[in-house]
Amino acid sequence: MRQQNLPPEEIARTSQRADYLVHAFGTLLKKPKPTEGDVLELVTNVVKTGLVEPDQVMDFLKQVPKDADKLRAFLEHRRAAAMHVAITMKSIAAESNAAQGSAVPS
């Protein structure tokens, strides 16, 4: 993977946000029937952490399906996307650390 020239702080923040979302979506998916209320609670909590801006949440909420049968697939897709970002950021961080000659944290 090619180094993306992102500042280390941005790599760390994006990685932290993605890790949080992977866990949060995974927690929702453990429920037999996640609801819109569960999603609202998730986004409220992520805004409180400061990892996501309120305007980003509003865009996300517009995408949440009203149909309960489609909600699970939506959440699975979002979890997979967050997992992809988390893996990508860890790879970029490892490349950045290797380029600087420092040890890669595990």
Image (cartoon, rainbow, N blue to C red):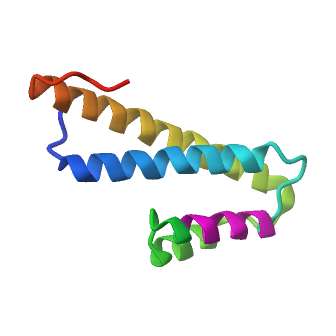
* Residue at the limit of the structure toward the left, as seen here: 100
Q: For the magenta stretch, what is the residue range?
A: 37-46
Residue 94's place in the image compared with 61, above or below, is above
How far across and how far down the image is residue 62, in percent? 61, 73
Q: In which quarter of the image is the N terminus?
A: top left
How far across and how far down the image is residue 103, in percent? 21, 21
Residue 55's place in the image compared with 46, above or below, is below
**In front: 50, or 83?**
50
**In front: 61, or 89?**
89
**In front: 96, or 48?**
48
Query: Residue drawn at (24%, 52%), measured in percent from left and top?
Result: 9
Q: Residue 38: within the magenta? A: yes
**In front: 50, or 53?**
50
Q: Quadrant of the C terminus?
A: top left
Query: Residue drawn at (18%, 29%), measured in percent from left and top?
Result: 97
Query: Residue drawn at (63%, 72%), measured in percent from left and top?
Result: 44
